[in-house]
Image (cartoon, helix red, strand yellow):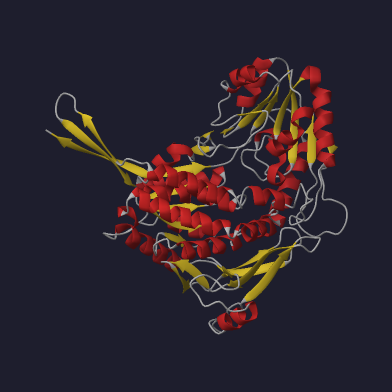
Amino acid sequence: MAHPQIRRAGPPRRKTITVSGLRTALSTLVPAGHPPIEHHVLSGSHGTPWGEFTMDPNHLFIGGRWVHTSSDRFIDVASASTGDHLGTVPDGSPDDIDRAVGAARAAFDAPAGWSSWGPEHRAAAMIHLADALEARKGATSAAVSAQNGMPITVARSFEGVVPSALLRYYAGLADGMTSEELRTGLPRGTTLVRREPVGVVAAIMTWNFPQTIAFFKVAPALAAGCALVLKPAPETVLDSVLLAEAVEEAGIPDGVINIVPGGRDTGAYLVSHPDIDKVSFTGSTRAGRQVAAACAELLRPVTLELGGKSAAVVLDDADLSANAEQFFMASLLNNGQTCYASTRILAPRSRYLEVVEFCTAMARAAVVGDALDPDAQIGPLVSQRQRERVLGYIKTGLNEGAQLTTGGRRPPGPDRGWFVEPTVFTDVENSSTIAQEEIFGPVLTITPYDGEDEAVRLANESAYGLAGTVWTTDLDHGAQVARRLRTGTVGLNGYLPDLTSPYGGRKASGLGTELGPEGLHAYQQLQSIYHP
């Protein structure tokens, strides 16, 4: 699929004109039968304007400029909070992907191009891009919230902050990076070990944290000297056009970052393109297996960040009331549309009713509302399809014998937007469907355990291994329990990925690592030059 152009008044590297003038000027470029230019002001339920966009649904950001799509298919983007039309975007074609990959290849292979720049020069350009993104953080946050239902307060903390933070972090790593190391050989001679950029990267993102996930890939790839083709999910494309504007403004060389949004067909074509050197994919485990199979056939390096069904291990001495905010963020962040969310709660039998009451009260107290309302703690799900999927899991849980303590339905009132009430299940068998499958909504399950050994066993009885949490007043003991969990990451009394440390899953949660220096190494390849 392909991308919309979201244009604010006075886009970079163009003459500054009024919104109405921009709309009129762009309209002259729209062929007969194609969607018209649209202008949107994104506002919450209280009328606060969070972002303003002018969208041209006929162009893509390829080779450092806006080029006309070759596609004759279009995607309608709707507000998760209201179902109202937000805009129309092109569904990118194979020809669009060919042009984007070609532009990235040309940028990477150019003798004086991005890959040949010194680390300090790449770092300076990355800082400029961070500045340009920060100037758009309000509009970016609003665009994400409007599309996927992320509460605006969460969007401002993640989507508005993490991309520039990652750019600055990896710029610092790049600035101090040594690309060559001379080693004493065995049995004789010396070896020059070189770290080189891997090449042209296909970066495929999902819709739940679109800009944060994008820069898990973009920031280290840029630091390494790679060029990229980004494929945003069709549900979240407004924010990617703001990213393209920032790339233009920052002076990133033409072709280093190209953006072609779309769905599965577009992603599959990109993954298998002969001029792609590495794939980085974030999405469902099912789709990840397909990407892995394609990369295996091509012997192509791939990083996969996939699904999760994380356990929250509540120990005997846990003080949940003192960590109520952290527990909410660990379990219900972004309306439960978070891959690492601790939605599978394991409670000691001696405190089981207490934990059930705590979780039930937390869910009932959560403010459900329009994603652009600053008071909302739980927004809508990304789409009607996702809401029906979550409601289907709730029905399955009831059919399998679990008990609802709260939620389990659409909120009362007008049926606008894709809302589901925060839901808590008790009497949940660890082997049940709702305890084993990723629901990706505001649904918590609570299962009792007898003794820490059983808690660890239950936590590890999962196809996934992305994350988990341990709740205790004894952090040293909590760390001992965490070491027994077969997951890539564990949080103590909360969960928030550390941008300087490796983040990645085990088992069905993925392959490889993002973030930290390890995330940079994933975009490099090694060469050894032997000297006598």
Viewer-nearest residue: 277 or 478 = 478
Percent x, y for residue 531?
Answer: 14, 35
Q: Is residue 374 above or below residue 77?
A: above
At a point 72% along the width and 29% down the height, the residue shown is: 345
Instruction: Note whether residue 398 is visible.
Output: no
At a point 74% along the width and 18% down the height, the residue shown is: 317
Instruction: Note whether residue 97 is visible.
Output: yes
Viewer-nearest residue: 395 or 261 = 261
Q: Residue furthest right?
A: 413
Q: Is residue 394 above or below residue 253?
A: above
Left or right: residue 124 compared with residue 243:
left
At a point 36% along the width and 49% down the height, the residue shown is: 120
Viewer-nearest residue: 59 or 48 = 48
Percent x, y for residue 171?
Answer: 44, 47
Left or right: residue 401 compared with residue 221:
right
Percent x, y for residue 299?
Answer: 35, 45
Looking at the rendered structure, the number of numbered marks drawn on it comes to 0
Q: The C terminus lies in which quarter of the figure?
A: top left
Q: Residue furthest left?
A: 532
Q: Is residue 392 above or below residue 84?
A: above
Occupied quadrant, residue 430: top right
At a point 38% along the width and 60% down the height, the residue shown is: 104
Q: Is residue 211 above or below residue 349?
A: below
Left or right: residue 354 compared with residue 474:
right
Percent x, y for residue 276?
Answer: 37, 54
